[in-house]
């Protein structure tokens, strides 16, 4: 009898535990989408993020700084964002800047003021991780002076935006960063800032032969900025967790592009952060299980700003050429710097690399309308490198420089695709082109952007419902 009682008691305990874990497992959790660039940035992520946020409760920016630029066109009006998540243009959407972002506080307030001047309410919806490193004036000075030094020594520029992003990430990794949370503690801020400036100014004076950055005005300015930024500080990772637990839909917004990733891009001609989908978790303070779908934004051709190898590049300064067509019709100038973007044919072998790195669920093809009217369209399907054929972008930038692209040719189309909203409306050759790009790059195409406005979108599979 005693044994039967013990057995019954154990069964009862197991049923209680089962009930507890079962109830936890069926708690409603949000569906989350990560948006990343599949090329060298400038793929049109801002428009796509803005469009997707119609279905989202919040948008999380997880890396980069104000070296990124997302241009939105809403009812014909252009808005350029650099630090603030693209979801800010939707009045009910919360915006989060995660710990993986480096924040220039002066630029942040300038961007907030510009949006507020246009009638967009920002401050009640924007929260910034206390763990974000700050971009200081000395970071900008170092960034600019290094590029000048490289050029004067005949090394060649990396092609940075000169915004101080790289030096800010260096300080983060070296564990000497001044962070957003330091703005709450004036004495700690002064101590950390003085130590950091001592090092920066030594480098500026002794190695880069330029003017140092003064401590007192820098410190005073940070104290002034702190008054405005303090109310925006938050434990962003925990806020995201709470959103997820109550079933909110979140969109994680990447900046730059996969091929500019510090680890996986065309190093050293890369940015200073991880732009890939995996960093959406680390750069916002949640785990990878929170990420349900990865959308890779892919331009219908390829562009690149700054230095670095570019196998399918075409000359853009000769009227009547394909490169000139892509550059002018596509209005290819950098959002942040205004520099002309280098242009070339779509590189499916590079896309294959990006889709593997990101574990891309689906792709969104943007600027398809720029190809309208071309008699023939080429797609790079692989390369010849040192006498052998390869079908994926190499890891070594010097190898990429020696790659000779191997092309597959497609008939173009004369009809316009601009503004179309249904797959059935696309010209037959445009459909064939898109289907072949999906096949070559190894990832389905779930969306097509046919113009800059929100409505110029074809949806084959919605990321929030896939």
Image (tube, helix red, strand yellow):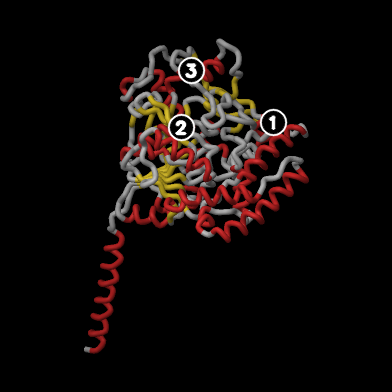
Name which residue lies at 46% across and 48% down: 228
Secondary element at tag 1:
loop
Q: Which mark is residue 386?
A: 1
The residue at 55%/10% (across/down) is: 320
Which residue, as the protein is rendered here, is positioned at the far left?
A: 1
Residue 394 in the image, given as x and y percentages of width and height: 62, 37
User: What's the residue at 31%, 53% (across, down)?
Assistant: 29
Give the mark nearest the N terminus, 2 or 1. Answer: 2
| Mark 3 or 2, closer to the camera | 2
User: Mark 1 Cα within 10 Å, few/some/many (few <14, many 20+)?
Assistant: few
Instruction: Return the residue at label 3.
Output: 329
Q: Position of residue 166 (x, y in %)?
A: 62, 43
Disc count in the image?
3
Query: For residue 372, what is the image quadrant?
Result: top left
Residue, far bottom: 2
- In-front residue for pair 90/274: 90
Q: Residues within 10 Å of mark 2 (few under 14, many from 20)?
A: some
């Amino acid at each position: 009898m005693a044994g039967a009682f013990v057995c019954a008691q154990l069964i009862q305990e197991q049923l209680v535990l089962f009930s507890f874990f079962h109830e936890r497992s069926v708690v409603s959790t949000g569906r989350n989408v990560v948006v990343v660039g599949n090329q060298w940035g400038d793929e049109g992520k801002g428009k796509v993020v803005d469009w997707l946020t119609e279905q989202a409760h919040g948008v999380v920016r997880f890396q980069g700084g104000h070296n990124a630029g997302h241009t939105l066109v809403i009812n014909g009006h252009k808005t350029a964002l650099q630090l603030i998540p693209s979801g800010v243009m939707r009045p009910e959407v919360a915006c989060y800047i995660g710990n993986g972002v480096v924040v220039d506080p002066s630029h942040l307030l300038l961007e907030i003021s510009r949006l507020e001047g246009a009638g967009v309410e920002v401050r009640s919806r924007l929260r910034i991780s206390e763990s974000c490193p700050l971009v200081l004036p000395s970071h900008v000075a170092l960034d600019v002076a290094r590029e000048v030094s490289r050029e004067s020594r005949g090394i060649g520029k990396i092609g940075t935006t000169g915004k101080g992003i790289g030096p800010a990430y260096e300080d983060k990794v070296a564990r000497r960063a001044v962070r957003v949370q330091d703005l709450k503690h004036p004495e700690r801020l002064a101590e950390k800032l003085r130590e950091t400036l001592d090092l920066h100014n030594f480098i500026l004076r002794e190695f880069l032969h330029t003017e140092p950055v003064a401590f007192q005005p820098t410190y005073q300015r940070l104290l002034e900025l702190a008054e405005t930024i303090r109310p925006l500080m938050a434990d962003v990772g925990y806020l995201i967790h709470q959103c997820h637990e109550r079933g909110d839909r979140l969109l994680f917004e990447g900046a730059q592009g996969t091929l500019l990733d510090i680890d996986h891009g065309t190093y050293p001609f890369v940015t200073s952060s991880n732009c890939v989908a995996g960093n959406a978790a680390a750069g916002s303070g949640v785990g990878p299980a929170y990420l349900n779908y990865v959308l890779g934004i892919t331009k219908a051709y390829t562009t690149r700003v700054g230095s670095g190898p570019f196998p399918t590049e075409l000359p853009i300064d000769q009227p009547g050429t394909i490169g000139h067509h892509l550059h002018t019709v596509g209005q290819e100038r950098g959002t942040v710097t205004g520099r002309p973007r280098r242009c070339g044919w779509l590189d499916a072998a590079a896309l294959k690399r990006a889709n593997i790195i990101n574990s891309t669920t689906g792709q969104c093809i943007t600027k398809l309308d720029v190809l309208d009217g071309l008699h023939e369209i080429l797609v790079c399907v692989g390369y010849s490198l040192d006498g052998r054929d390869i079908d994926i972008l190499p890891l070594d930038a010097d190898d990429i420089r020696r790659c000779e692209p191997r092309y597959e040719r497609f008939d173009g189309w004369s009809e316009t695709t601009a503004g179309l909203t249904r797959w059935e409306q696309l010209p037959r050759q445009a459909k064939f082109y898109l289907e072949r790009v999906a096949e070559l790059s190894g990832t389905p195409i779930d969306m097509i952007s046919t113009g800059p406005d929100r409505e110029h979108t074809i949806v084959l599979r919605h990321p929030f419902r896939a």
